Amino acid sequence: MNKNLIFAFLSLVICCSPTKKDRQVTDSTITSNPHVVVKTPVDTTGNEKVEEDCVFNDDYYGLTVEWLKELNKRNFIWRSNLNQALLPMGQDTVFISKGGCYHFGISVELKLTNDNHLISDSTYWIQTALQLADNYKMEHYSKMIKKGQIRKVQNSELRIWYEVDDDNENDNFFYNGIEITFAEKVKRINITEYYN
C-alpha cells in the first residue's frame, strides 16, 4: 500500500478522533498592537475553567488559520488539544501555532521521520531551518541565517541550539533561536518567537 495513502488515512483517523469541546470566547478589545488583545473570556460550555483577562490573543485556531491563509497553505489538520495545525509533507510533518494568553507565541516545527543526516551536519540543518523560516515568513530568522548571524550555544549528541540576535531589545519581542533535536528515529527543527 502506498505510504502517502497510509499517512493520509492515519491523519484522517487522528483528525476525526473525539477531542474535548472547544470553549467559546466573547468580549474582546483590540489594542494598538495587532497581537495584543485584552480578553475577558466567557465560558459558554460550563465545563472548563476559563482564563480571565488575557494579555494577548489566545484564539490559536483563528490566528493560526489566518496565518495559513496568508501563506496560501490549505492542506492542514487542526489539533485543538495541541493548539496547532499539522501540515503533512509526505512522511514528515510541519506543526505551526500562533497565539497565547500571557505569552504570545509564533512557532514552526518540522518533524522528520526518515532523515539520515547526522546532528553534526550543521550545513544541512541550517539550510533546512532557512527553508522553514522562508516558507512560514519568519523573516528575522531568515535574515539572520542568510547573514550568518547565528551562534551555536548548545551542542550534545541529541540536541543543538542556535541563538539568534534580537533586532530590538526594547520591543518586548523575543527569539528562542533554532533548536534541533534527535529522539530515536525522529528529528525536529523548531523556530519560535514570542511577545512576553
Image (cartoon, rainbow, N blue to C red):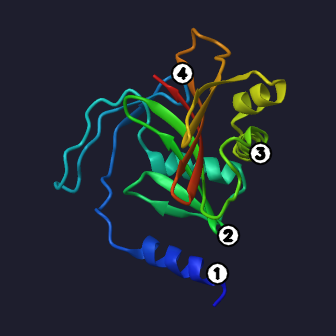
> In the rendered structure, which disc, 3 or 4, sits on the residue that comes first in sequence?
4
> Image check: 188 left or right of 58?
right
Task: Give SS at disc 3.
Answer: helix
Q: Where is residue 87 in the image (x, y as percent from the top left)?
A: 61, 61
> In the rendered structure, which disc, 3 or 1, sits on the residue that comes first in sequence?
1
What residue does disc 3 label?
124
Q: Are the residues flagged by discs 2 and 1 in contact, CB closer than 8 Å?
A: yes
- Residue type pointed to by label 1: Lys
- Residue type pointed to by label 2: Gly
Residue at position x 70%, y 31% in the image = 141
Residue 173 position by quadrant:
top right
What residue does disc 2 label?
90
- Callout 3: 10 Å neighbours few (<14), some, many (20+)? few
Q: Are the residues flagged by discs 3 and 1 in contact, CB closer than 8 Å?
A: no
What residue does disc 1 label?
3
Q: Are the residues flagged by discs 4 and 2 in contact, CB closer than 8 Å?
A: no
Q: How far apart are marks 3 and 4 (CA)?
A: 40 Å
What residue does disc 4 label?
32
